[in-house]
Amino acid sequence: MRTYLDCMSCFVRQALEASRMVTEDERIQRDVLDSVMEMLPKLSFHVTPPEIASVVHRMVKDVTGNPDPYKEVKKRHNQLALNLYPRIKEIVAQSDDRLLNSIKVAIAGNAIDLGVQGHVKDIEGSIHAAFSFKLIINNYDEFKERLMQCNFLLYLGDNAGEIVFDKLLIEEISMLKDMEIVFVVRGEPVINDATMEDAEFVRMGDKVRVIPNGSDAPATILSQCSPEVRQLFSEADMIISKGQGNYESLSREDKPFFLLKAKCPVVAGDLGVNVGDIILKSRVVE
Amino acid sequence: MRTYLDCMSCFVRQALEASRMVTEDERIQRDVLDSVMEMLPKLSFHVTPPEIASVVHRMVKDVTGNPDPYKEVKKRHNQLALNLYPRIKEIVAQSDDRLLNSIKVAIAGNAIDLGVQGHVKDIEGSIHAAFSFKLIINNYDEFKERLMQCNFLLYLGDNAGEIVFDKLLIEEISMLKDMEIVFVVRGEPVINDATMEDAEFVRMGDKVRVIPNGSDAPATILSQCSPEVRQLFSEADMIISKGQGNYESLSREDKPFFLLKAKCPVVAGDLGVNVGDIILKSRVVE
């Protein structure tokens, strides 16, 4: 997905929010904003939004001197999600269509995204509401069919906290069919995106192999990913791509199934849906 | 009210919206945004938000070469409000407290503000809903008392469209007590703020004397206003200040009664209310 001019003010807002995670000193916050605003006019917009976001968040880390502004927030979200997990697991297990419901929960977990809204409201409420979600783009049949033929699934994670519900979906998938699953996290901390540290915190490694993608973008920008991740991307029978960032960077790829909540007008517009809609989309069946 | 760092992304968003009013050419839109982002780091933030906004919107006009980007929108809003006027006037006339209800309608008219939300949803619905509004800060008794002692009222207008409902409030005030009323509009077009052209379109001059404030800010920045407006400000027995922009620029002045809807988190925070709350506030009774 290309970068729209609407993304500019959003980058400025994100930079402020990230700098507020690090310090209450308004002079430092303003230094961050000034640096970002001086840089944005120099960038080409013929790239995806996360490519610019990665430059913005690198600048936040440089100016504040903090390599992981969302460290504490991520820990809190992981713990919060872990606390919810047993009850949600139980509801999924008792439901009619466990796979569909665990997909919905995994998308609801995507509400835990500080890049877009700046704050997370009532995570517990969102997760519980997931069961009555209606998928606005719904390629579930295709998804299920591909899953039953899949021997190697590549799962591109998104945010801390959210990955607990990705783990739940992975458990359901594993019960349906035996397959190799690799879970990919970001290579470096950026916003509240999940890294190896978060995957370890929620014990994702108990279920699947976890690897970092080698990039500090809040997305999967293949050209910035490690050769290993690029190879797995090309070898996988099926790819699950979680969240807006991964969608923004991979929307022109045929392979992934995109599981996300459309959280901003630009992404919603690109998908032809409304802000807040939840999506299970395959490009192949377009 | 001081400028907060949160206002930065809002200035960038406003610049985009204003440039989109002028052209669909993304290169020009990007030129505007780049110019604004290059300028913002150079400005002191020890001023009120409209002081910066006036510089931003001057830049929009310079870069696009259009001195009045919202000209057509303002005309549309004026006409829309004029169409609603007879029915709303009738409802006010039949109500228990005509003054209070015309105040509420005048504040509802303040929903017609493209500086904050970028678009106006369902103006008719908002105006009709006004009658059930609850004033969250409510200095109505003080307002009424001062009005009954007032011989010279200065009324600081805000947006096009909205001024039709200001006119309705002025008519109600005039029926309560005979007094001199001067209605002040912006000196130059800025966003969708009302100018002499708009006042003429809605025939405000039939009721009161209308004067431009001599400034191109979306607010009443006294140091930028004409000597005449400054003198009237000091001579007036009572001042009605409509909208966010006027509040942002005059919040430290004791004299005005502020009638506004808190439309952004920064102004709402300054007032200690929630976004969307409507306010009739006097600093004197704080």
Image (spheres, coloured by chain):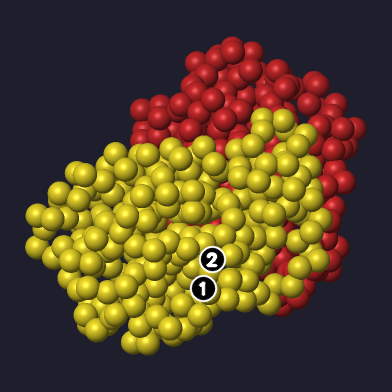
Chain colours: A red, B yellow
Q: Answer few, some or many: residues within 10 Å of disc 1's Cα (few below 14, many 20 plus, some between 14 and 19).
A: many
Pointer 2 or 1: first along the chain: 2
Residue at position x 49%, y 68% from top? B246
Instruction: Residue at 23%, 67% (x, y): give it.
Output: B174
Residue B17 location, quadrant: top right
Is residue A262 found left or right of A256 in the rendered image? left
Using residue B238 as the reference point, say whether residue A144 is left or right of it: right
Residue type at mark 1: give it. Answer: Val
Which image quarter is the N terminus of chain B in?
Answer: bottom right
Residue A58 is drawn in which quadrant? bottom right
Q: Residue furthest right?
A: A227
- Distance, label 2 to label 1, CA atoms, is 6 Å
Q: Position of residue B285 (x, y in %)?
A: 33, 87
Q: Please say whether residue A74 is visible from this viewpoint.
A: no
Which disc is residue B270 wearing? none
Q: At 44% from the left edge and 33% from the top edge, which residue is drawn? A: A101
The residue pinned by badge 2 equals B213
Front residue (pair B136, A215): B136
Q: Which mark is residue B229?
A: 1
Q: Residue at x 21, y 80 (%)?
A: B148
